[in-house]
Image (cartoon, rainbow, N blue to C red):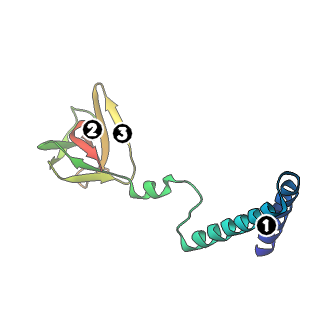
Amino acid sequence: MAGATEEASDSTAAVLQVWALTHCRLKDITTMRMTRLKTIALAATLSCAGILTVGPAASASAQLGCQYKVLWPTAGVYENPNPSSVVVKTKHAGDIVGASTCEGAAYNEYGYVLVTTDAAADGRGWIRDQAVVQI
């Protein structure tokens, strides 16, 4: 893998050098080459240290899911996202609720967000979206 990286780096450097010869002074070529090499070295160092990541930015958020703080004095956690559904649990102002995924649902004018609860048959409960704020 290192050989392929060196070859790609050499070919990139060659292209930059040709471009620099036609567009820049000789002094600028050396500066560009050093800047490019420093950038490659810095990216490799940060990548190995786990500071620089390449890939979906949402992956860290997806692992954390969504967390909400309850605003209402009392808020029902429903079995289904529907005001006629059974209230399986009651949460109070300041409680933290959430789920591993960020899902929402609507029933007429009412919006709901998914929360995890042992009180629901499937482990999934729904709380009114106006009763909470995402944290």
Indicate the amino acid at tag 1.
Answer: Thr
Using the image as rendered, state which of residue 16 and residue 54 is in the foreground: 16
In the rendered structure, are the residues bearing label 2 and label 1 in contact, judged by CB atoms less than 8 Å apart?
Answer: no
N-terminal of the two: label 2 or label 3? 3
Where is residue 102 shown, x and y percent of the image?
39, 46
What is the number of callouts on the image? 3
- Label 1 sits on a secondary structure element that is helix
Residue of label 3: 104
N-terminal of the two: label 2 or label 1? 1
Using the image as rendered, state which of residue 122 and residue 61 is in the foreground: 61
54 over 69 or under it: above or below: below
- Label 3 sits on a secondary structure element that is strand
N-terminal of the two: label 3 or label 1? 1
Using the image as rendered, state which of residue 65 and residue 122 is in the foreground: 65
The disc label shown at residue 129, or none: 2
Using the image as rendered, state which of residue 59 and residue 78 is in the foreground: 59
The disc label shown at residue 125, or none: none
In the rendered structure, are the residues bearing label 2 and label 3 in contact, judged by CB atoms less than 8 Å apart?
Answer: yes
Between disc 3 and disc 1, the foreground one is 1
Question: Distance between the Cα atoms at labels 2 and 3?
Answer: 8 Å
Where is residue 47 shown, x and y percent of the image?
59, 69
Instruction: Give the residue drawn at x 50%, y 56%.
Output: 59
The disc label shown at residue 30, or none: 1
Relative placement, left or right, of 27 versus 74 is right
